[in-house]
Image (cartoon, coloured by chain):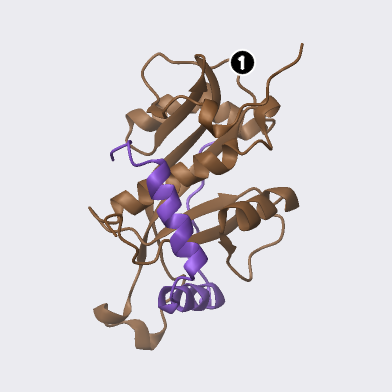
Amino acid sequence: MNIKQLSPEDLELPIILSMGETFPDFSCGEEGVDEFIHQQALDYQKENLGITYIFKHSGRLIGFATISMGDLNKDKMEAGDRLPQSIPNYPILLIGQIGVCEDQQRGGIGKHICDFCIDRALKLSEKIGCRFVVVNAVPKEEVIRFYEDKIGFKMLPKQEKGKQKTMILNIHTYKITD
Amino acid sequence: MLPKTTPPLNEEQWKAIEEEIKRKPTTDEVQRLKKIKETFKSIPL
């Protein structure tokens, strides 16, 4: 069966995952991500730990992203850092999970979903403060390249080999009303 | 697999963040953010 390669324009507007929705046929090829959308996303959302936005075409789930708020902070404070004014942390929007079904990968859908998350961060930055979009990427070269080259994320230096890679995208002080 | 939290940052990572905070956006970055804003303008927060 030939499967049409969709473009972002073919997708319905993203909506928040709702009660009772299941997507047993969805697979992005990453077992942990599939497990999340199949079994955990609704409970995660019910607990207000992360909101899952789903992107469909003709009722079929094509991709999703789960986002939540977080912050970047420093591992160890030095003696000189103990005054409150020198203990910054930076508010972030965390892309906790993201997946595109296997037959629709490499067609721009993943970028579209990331852009949607960046738009959430831009809008949030005017309501509650948000300076970075962060993703903890699977440590695979093609995944890292996607986030760097297609989206504009930067990988933080000195990260442990073989573990998730923290990548940041600075939304600067750009205002949505500009 | 549940989403993973972002681990606390070491000195070098923190330095990279602080440099990023001070950095002015490039014209390309501003254009990209504007384009994203335009793409999703019909979807309120």
| Residue appearing at x 42%, y 32% in the figure | A52
| Residue appearing at x 69%, y 30% in the figure | A29
Residue under numbered circle 1:
A25
Residue nearest the observer in this picture, A90 or A78: A90
User: Quarter-wise, where is residue A153 in the image?
Assistant: bottom right
Q: Is residue A158 left or right of residue B45?
A: right
Q: Colour of chain A?
A: brown
The spot of residue A95 in percent (x, y) is: 48, 46
Mark 1 closeness class: few <14, some 14–19, many ≥20 residues within 10 Å: few
| Residue appearing at x 33%, y 33% in the figure | A47
The spot of residue A136 in percent (x, y) is: 56, 52
Which residue extends farthest bottom?
A80
Task: Tell me if residue B3 can be seen.
Answer: no
Q: Tell how many labels.
A: 1
Kindly identify the amino acid type of the residue bearing the numbered disc 1.
Asp
User: Quarter-wise, where is residue A60 in the image?
Assistant: top right
Task: Tell me if residue A56 can be seen.
Answer: yes
Which residue extends farthest left?
A127
The chain displayed purple equals B
User: Quarter-wise, where is residue A32 in the image?
Assistant: top right
**Which chain letter goes with mark 1?**
A
For the C terminus of chain A, the image quarter is bottom left
Q: Is residue A60 left or right of residue A146?
A: left
Q: Is residue B12 left or right of residue A123?
A: right
The spot of residue B17 in percent (x, y) is: 47, 72
Residue nearest the observer in this picture, A17 or A106: A106
Residue nearest the observer in this picture, A148 or A40: A148
Which residue extends farthest right?
A1
| Residue appearing at x 51%, y 14% in the figure | A58
Instruction: Give the secondary structure at mark 1.
Output: loop
Q: Is residue A31 left or right of residue A21?
A: right
For the N terminus of chain A, the image quarter is top right
